[in-house]
Image: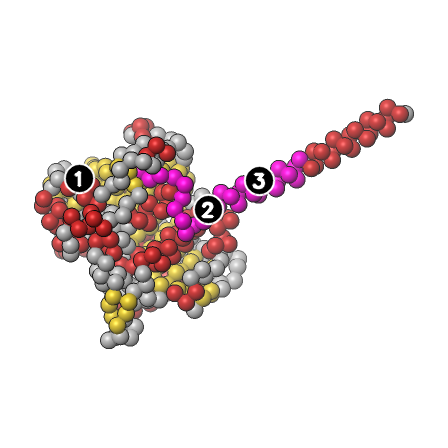
Amino acid sequence: MHNARGISRNLAILKSSILLSLVLAAGFTRLARAEDLLDPTKMGPYPVGVTSIEFVDHDRIDSLTNEPRTLLTEIWYPATDDSKDLPRNKFSDFLVRGTNPELNKLVEKFLKVKLDDVDKRFKDDSVRDARIRDGKFPLIVFSHGNGGIRTQNANWCEHMVSHGYIIMSPDHTGNCAATCVNGKVIPYNVGKMMVASQDRPKDVSFLIDCMTRMNAGADSRFVGKIDLDRIGVAGHSFGGYTSAAIIETDQRVKAIIPMAPVWPMRKNFTTPVLMYIATEDKTIKPAGNAIVRRRYDESKGPRYSVEVLDGGHFTFTDMFQADPNFGDGVGSGERVTRPGEKLTYLPEGISHEILNSYSLAFFGVYLKGQDGYKKFLAENHYGDKIIYKFSEPGASAPTVGQ
């Protein structure tokens, strides 16, 4: 009898110990998950590497070059810690290391400033051809604007990569300011806009195919490094159109971020979307912004809208690094909502924090499954600088801010 009571007491103690261990384990798990949610306004813990690759689509003939469609593509990726002390990438390094005078001249025309001056101003956190770190990372494809370049959002790309993403950003041949393929310089072609609208979504799907092959062994650097179940697309202006168009044709894309987009007609209303609007956008104009707002209202899946009140078209780019007074979102200009009224656009330090933080939280939720970032997405963190709206399935659609 005495032994029976002892055994019973020991079992009770054991059960209590197990229960306590489970409670503590659950608590530590919650703490660990909370700690994993880094401040989205800050750069993440990973150094950033960058490399340039030409991808050739032998299944398509480019109408401009009459050769297989070729895309000069920048890839940003999380790098190993030993790259922290290595020299940083220069802007001219994006232009085949500045070795092609014709390409340099065309890019200078687009940027409206000398390449040497851009190199002096350009702040870059990436290391060219650094080693990629161990891990498996979601893939984002970024699409530049009409007549833009693949590096126009380098700051945004580096921010995302530092938090554990891999980004591919192509020059859409014929629709970028200038690119170099097969050793030949291809300038922007204004007469190919309709062709570009068809090529761009195909370019994105092709690059996803390329990274799928690289992940499987076609490029030893990226073997097993891509989480192909977690793919997003972002883009600026015509690239915003591209991100909206791709979800109509490629189900591998799980979430999109159109920035100051031209937005096509749609059939897919459910893919999660975070859209950026600039109230004083001279390129999209109020009529274009009205369409984007209507696309938000039409969305049935998770939807978020960040409208920068004193923003312009290029607020969401790195054009300030080329020319601090580039205009239409960079430096100073004139309002489109009240013609004739002068305007100093929202400084890039604030506008890029807005862009980077909401983007990171959004892709964190809808690509990485970091639901803790929903708390960040549920608030307007920038007061009267933005109009912020969001809605999730099964929830009300609160409007936070102005």
* 345 in magenta: no
Q: State which tag comes first along the sequence, 1 or 3.
A: 3
Asked which quadrant contains residue 274, the reply is bottom left
- Which residue position holds label 3? 29
Residue at 84% across, 27% down: 6
The amino acid on which the numbered mark 1 sits, given as a three-letter code, is Arg
Q: CA distance from mark 1 to mark 3?
A: 47 Å
Q: Are marks 2 and 3 in contact (CB under 8 Å)?
A: no
The span picked out in magenta is 21-50
- Along the line of sight, the residue nearer the viewer: 58 or 222: 222
- Along the line of sight, the residue nearer the viewer: 119 or 382: 119
* 25 in magenta: yes
Q: Which mark identifies residue 362? A: none
Q: Which mark identifies residue 38? A: 2
Residue at 29% across, 30% down: 219
Q: Are marks 2 and 1 in contact (CB under 8 Å)?
A: no
Specify whether 123 is left or right of 183: right
- Which residue position holds label 1? 97
Q: Secondary structure at mark 1?
A: helix
Image height of 378 relative to 142, above or below: below
Image height of 131 relative to 76, above or below: above
